[in-house]
Image (spheres, rainbow, N blue to C red):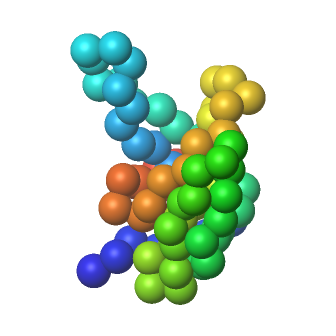
Amino acid sequence: MQKKFKRGDHVKWNSEAGRVSVSVSGVIIKVHTKDFDVNDYTHHASADEPQYEIESDKTDHVAMHKGTALTKIRR
């Protein structure tokens, strides 16, 4: 079953930093339920498998992830 999140949820995910996997966290700022483009790349999303736009807690970086990559956390 696909995990569902909403705007404002605080989540974490694993990110590759060279050869080491690190945990990164942020806040969901947008939920995409249709395909969308970012930097000439099409991210595939649907109502059944949304993509989440997440603003990092530590940087101004914005990441896109499916729910399967995310875990909800408390602030």
Q: Which of 57 and 41 is in front in this view?
A: 41
Above-or-below relation of 22 to 28: above
Residue name at image x 34 percent, y 76 percent: 2
Q: x, y (%) of residue 64?
A: 56, 50
Residue name at image x 57 percent, y 59 percent: 42
Q: Can residue 36 be seen in this view?
A: yes
Q: x, y (%) of residue 46?
A: 52, 80
Q: Is residue 9 visible?
A: no
Q: Quadrant of residue 37?
A: bottom right
Above-or-below relation of 6 to 37: below
Residue name at image x 36 percent, y 36 percent: 14
Above-or-below relation of 41 to 9: above
Above-or-below relation of 19 to 60: above
- Which residue is outermost to the bottom? 47
Q: In this view, does 13 lie to the left or right of 27?
A: left
> Dividing the image into 4 quarters, which one contains the C terminus?
top right
Q: x, y (%) of residue 49?
A: 44, 76
Q: Is residue 8 left or right of residue 63?
A: right
Q: x, y (%) of residue 72?
A: 45, 56
Residue name at image x 36 percent, y 53 percent: 69
- Which residue is outermost to the front? 40
> Dividing the image into 4 quarters, which one contains the N terminus?
bottom left
